[in-house]
């Protein structure tokens, strides 16, 4: 059956379960410490067997929770709801053997409710509130009473300043338990709940990015549809022009018409170039990545891209700087990626006909490309929107729809693109980062 659980939701729930696992460990350790101090430090005869038995069961269930995270089955919100319900039940059992609702640390009921309100929908939270309220109500009249003890904590075990406070204010055990509960709960809320809230905010940011990418993909599809339509509409007139140019070349095929024949040949070459570009545009519009991508050695792919670009702009000098680890990794050579890189090189050449820099650096799994120029740079009002949406720019800058499509193609391959100023120099630098495939090493 197809998995219908969103990956983002599963990842967030797994993160919450992990934090819950850590919180339980801290809670178990704190309760064990309190029992030891009460029994062996303050000589309070607590029922050790049921308390430690409950803690062992709680610890075993927490260990199973940790193992659960290693399985591929998705973690859903209902599972989180069951975890919180189990925590409330265990706290109820522990309080039953330690005074029930009269225990000064009965505030423990609030911990799972606070966390549940942070990470679960409102419906689940209200069910947990009703369950916790029922358990607390039962503990009001059903519990094992705490043994009778002195109203004050043993003074000889406390620092001198605390002893003075106790003697002056007659600090009772219940009041001290309430103080300890406040400090402990405040620390837990400040740390664990805040960390869980960070996870939720990160999920919201990912959802926002996903919506932005979906909108961009819709725009790309629209542009692809328009490109395919334009290619179809322009094919017939270009074909007619090609036929007429051939006839004119034949009609003026005389020795005295060499200059005219040369100009007609240039026109025919340009028409053929337009027809070839339209054929590629028509074939590429809407083409899926799996149909056009192929695995190729990175250095060969970069040479192929640069050779295609040089065939279009042979007059523009290129300063080349290529270096990386050996053996050379591979890359998925997509047609859309090639068009994106050539488009960015053309943009640089249009604003800087005397210099275009191409710097490539790669590690085993990451490629970084810097394409720079000596042009006037990018206007500040365009830096925030370039690549995110088609914009209207001047011909001198040569950026707009082309860079928008380049952004979409590169980000679709899990890459990134950004425009940087060139330090101490004029012009701009487009930095592209792409994932690559590590080279296979053979063991001898």
Image (cartoon, rainbow, N blue to C red):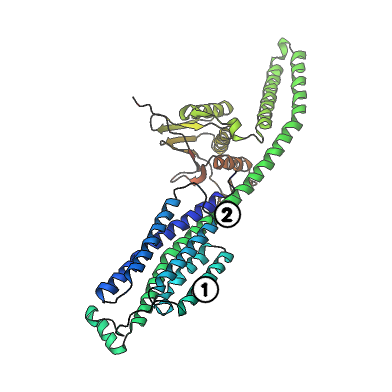
* Image depth: mark 1 or mark 2 in front: 1
Which of the image's four quarters has the N terminus?
A: top right
When asked about the image quadrant of residue 308, the answer is top right
The residue that disc 2 covers is 208
Q: At 44% from the left edge and 46% from the top edge, which residue is drawn?
A: 423
Please indicate, yes or no, whether residue 63 appears anywhere in the rendered image. yes
Q: Which mark is residue 227?
A: none
Instruction: Pick the residue in front: 13 or 82.
Output: 82
Q: Position of residue 273 (x, y in %)?
A: 66, 26
User: In the figure, 51 relative to 389: above or below?
Assistant: below
Q: Residues within 10 Å of mark 2 (few under 14, many from 20)?
A: few
Instruction: Pick the residue in front: 56 or 436.
Output: 56
Q: Position of residue 13 (x, y in %)?
A: 50, 55
Q: At 46% from the left edge and 80% from the top edge, which residue is drawn?
A: 141
Instruction: Pick the residue in front: 279 or 345.
Output: 279
Please indicate, yes or no, whether residue 314 appears anywhere in the rendered image. no
When asked about the image quadrant of residue 264, the answer is top right
Instruction: Pick the residue in front: 93 or 35.
Output: 93
User: In the figure, 321 relative to 181: above or below?
Assistant: above
Q: Secondary structure at mark 1?
A: helix
Viewed as shown, does residue 240 lie left or right of 381? right
User: In the figure, 109 relative to 308: above or below?
Assistant: below
Q: At 46% from the left edge and 28% from the top edge, which residue is drawn?
A: 299
- Asked if marks 1 and 2 touch (Cβ < 8 Å), the reply is no
Q: Residues within 10 Å of mark 1 (few under 14, many from 20)?
A: few
Q: At 46% from the left edge and 57% from the top edge, which residue is drawn?
A: 17
Viewed as shown, does residue 98 lie left or right of 166? right
Distance of label 1 from label 2 (alpha carbons): 40 Å
Q: Secondary structure at mark 2?
A: helix
Q: Which mark is residue 134?
A: 1
Q: Position of residue 261 (x, y in %)?
A: 70, 17
């Amino acid at each position: 059956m197809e998995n219908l659980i969103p990956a983002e939701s599963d990842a967030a729930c797994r993160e919450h379960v992990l934090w819950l696992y850590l919180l339980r460990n801290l809670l178990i350790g704190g309760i064990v410490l309190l029992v030891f101090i009460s029994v062996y430090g303050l000589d309070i005869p607590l029922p050790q067997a049921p308390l430690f038995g409950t803690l062992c069961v709680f610890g075993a269930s927490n260990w199973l929770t940790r193992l659960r995270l290693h399985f591929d089955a998705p973690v859903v919100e209902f599972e989180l709801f069951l975890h919180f319900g189990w925590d409330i039940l265990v706290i109820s059992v522990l309080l039953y053997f330690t005074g029930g609702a009269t225990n000064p640390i009965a505030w423990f009921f609030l911990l799972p409710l606070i966390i549940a309100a942070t990470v679960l929908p409102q419906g689940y939270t209200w069910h947990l509130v009703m369950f916790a309220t029922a358990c607390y109500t039962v503990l009001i009249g059903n519990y094992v009473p705490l043994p009778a003890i002195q109203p004050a904590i043993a003074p000889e075990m406390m620092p001198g300043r605390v002893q003075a406070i106790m003697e002056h204010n007659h600090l009772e055990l219940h009041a001290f338990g309430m103080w300890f509960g406040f400090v402990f709960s405040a620390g837990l809320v400040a740390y664990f709940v805040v960390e869980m809230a960070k996870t939720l905010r990160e999920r919201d940011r990912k959802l926002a990015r996903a919506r932005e990418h979906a909108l961009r993909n819709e725009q790309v599809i629209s542009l692809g549809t328009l490109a395919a339509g334009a290619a179809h509409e322009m094919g017939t007139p270009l074909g007619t022009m090609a036929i007429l140019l051939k006839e004119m070349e034949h009609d003026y095929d005389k020795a005295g018409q060499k200059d005219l024949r040369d100009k007609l040949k240039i026109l025919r070459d340009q028409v053929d170039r337009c027809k070839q570009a339209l054929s590629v545009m028509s074939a590429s519009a809407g083409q899926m990545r799996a149909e056009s991508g192929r695995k190729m050695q990175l250095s060969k792919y970069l040479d192929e891209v640069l050779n295609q670009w040089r065939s279009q702009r042979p007059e523009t000098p290129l300063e080349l700087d290529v270096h990386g680890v050996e053996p050379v990794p591979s890359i998925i050579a997509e047609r859309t990626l090639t068009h994106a890189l050539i488009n960015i090189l053309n943009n640089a050449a249009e604003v800087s006909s005397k210099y275009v820099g191409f710097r490539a650096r790669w590690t085993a799994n990451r490629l970084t490309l810097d394409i720079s120029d000596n042009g006037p740079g990018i206007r500040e009002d365009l830096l925030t929107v370039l690549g995110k949406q088609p914009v209207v720019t001047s011909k001198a800058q040569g950026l707009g729809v082309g860079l928008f499509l380049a952004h979409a193609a590169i980000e679709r391959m899990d890459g990134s693109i950004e425009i940087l100023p060139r330090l101490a120099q004029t012009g701009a630098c487009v930095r592209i980062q792409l994932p690559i495939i590590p080279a296979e090493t053979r063991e001898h």
